[in-house]
Image: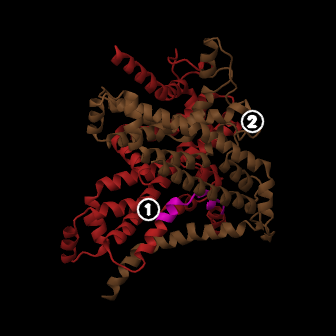
Chain colours: A brown, B red
Amino acid sequence: MKTKKLIPYFLVAPYIAHFLLFVAFPVVFSVILTFHQWNIISPMKYIGLANYTRLFQDKFFSQSLANTLIFLAIHIPLQIIIALLLAEALNQKIKFRGFFRAAFFLPVIVSGVVVTILWQQLYGFDTGLFNKILTALGLGRIGWLVDPSWAMPSIAIMATWKNVGLYIILFLVGLQTVPAHYYEAADLEGATHWQKFFRITLPMINPTIFMVVVLSTIGGFSLFIEPYVMTGGGPLNSTLSAVLYIYKQGFFYYHMGYSATLGLFFALLILSVVAIQKKFIEKDK
Amino acid sequence: MKKLIFYILLIAGASIFLYPFIWMLTASLTPENQIGNLTFFPTKLTFSSYSQMLGKIPIGRAFVNSIIVSSAVTLGVLVFGSMVGYALSRLEFKGRNLIFYIIIFTMTLPFQITLIPQYIIMVKFGWVDTYWALIVPYLMNAFGIIMFRQYFKSISQDLIDAARLDGCGEIKIIFKILWPNSIPALVTIGIITFMASWNEVLWPLIVIRDSQLMTMPQLVTLFAVGGAAESQLGVKLAAATMLALPIVFAYLLFQRYFIQSMASTGLKE
């Protein structure tokens, strides 16, 4: 009987060991690291709060924060609007729904590296598709990736294109949970299409919107491969993202202590932003 | 008429999502000097971009590395995930709730906080430039455990009791009784895990420096960023095509499962 009692612990033991080594220890160690200067090779040096004071004076840090906010300010609304529109379209009685759904979803499954390489060509200044269209329309070219004020918006547009398929599916699931008789009742009252959308659909899919906002926010703070491949964080650091900056500090300069400080700070920021979003959207309900 | 405009808009929308991929494929097969950025139908097809790429980077080796890493990770997540999921859903023991909260905690924990310490662990273990570094940190997945726990709850207790009467041990119950009855959960978790592992690029960039051990996305990333392909677009696109093909191929075969699986990750909140 005694061994029987131990069976559950035997089953969860590998997970607990893994958790302690790869989650619990790193969290504790990263806090310790923030008080130290260390390049892995030489011994760790205690430097008190120096990493934190540096963080608040570091203009690259504030720049990466600002860049992330720019990204989110464009990405989140764009994502919600396009995903909702396309989900609404797919929710109609249409032919080839499966084909359209599959097409919108394709970029979601493909590696970000592939998407980035492709969009780098589309954004090309002289030969890119977008500027060719603009010049064909008699408009001026845009420096999608070379103009500091356009580079981050360009990445935000690309990220929307890559991820929107997933959110279309999530909204589609959300839309299908709205009971049909709500719309029938509204039709009897003579409600317009827009009234139905704003009074019935939108409140009903509020939980889905919250999820999209949260996932996009986390995505924005996790942005790495897109600026790494496309711009290297430039021009003029305008696409330096949070994770790219952590990466540069950690694996370019081997500032382990400072890099860990950045990581801790961004992690806390993500958690608080998500908590605030949750409050905000739930109050709205 | 309204219907027609609707379909035209929808088709235009779909082509925005498909065009870049089709262009990638055709451009990678076009002679380098003919790759205009808009051309769809090259006058001449050639594999020269591919053969040049094969000469520059060990993409075949990277493909094998990616298969090894993603398969090992997926297998680990399925085996360990169902063990923990089973214990949490079907067995009574002290600390069960604590473990459940730990799992929820790891799900909400942003990876930015553990990135640097995890790298240091790899250095201290001497795992930099080994498969271990790519596989072991990913063997457990909180999301997978929660999904197994959820799914196992829906399986009838009678089935488990009957197996116990037949003298089955708990391990046998999990893999011989529950697994055959949990195909949808296995497929969903398997697809998500495999795909995430296949497309992961930040972690390999950190822990692998030896080009013989690089995964496919890492190799292609460094190829695109570094000088090796810079002047030749076709070669770069050939590498990107090779990276995209396996997943796109799997997607075409199991499209429904892919979409359902990915949608369920979003619904975990």
- Work out how far the residue at label 2 is from the one at label 1, CA to CA, in angstroms: 42 Å
- Does dot 1 land on a helix, a strand or a loop? helix
Q: Mark 2 points at which residue?
A: A235
Residue A263 is situated, as x and y percent measured from the top left of the image, at 67, 58
Q: Is residue B264 left or right of residue A121?
A: left
Does B111 appear in magenta? yes
Q: Which of A274 and B217 is in front in this view?
A: A274
Subunit of label 2: A
Q: Nearer the viewer, mark 2 or mark 1?
A: 2
Please tell me which residue is depicted at 60% across the width and 26% down the height of the picture. Answer: A122
Amino acid bearing label 1: Gly
Please tell me which residue is depicted at 80% across the width and 71% down the height of the picture. Answer: A46
- Does any portion of residue A152 appear in the rendered image? yes
Give the quadrant of residue A101. Answer: top left
- Does dot 2 land on a helix, a strand or a loop? loop
Amino acid bearing label 2: Pro
Subunit of label 1: B
The correct choice, above or below, for B251 with respect to B17 in the image is: below
Residue A18 is situated, as x and y percent measured from the top left of the image, at 51, 69
Does A111 appear in magenta? no
Which quarter of the rendering shows the C terminus of chain B? Answer: bottom left
Residue B26 is situated, as x and y percent measured from the top left of the image, at 51, 24
Residue A53 is situated, as x and y percent measured from the top left of the image, at 80, 60
From which residue to which does the magenta span run? B104-116
Q: Name the residue under label 1.
A: B76
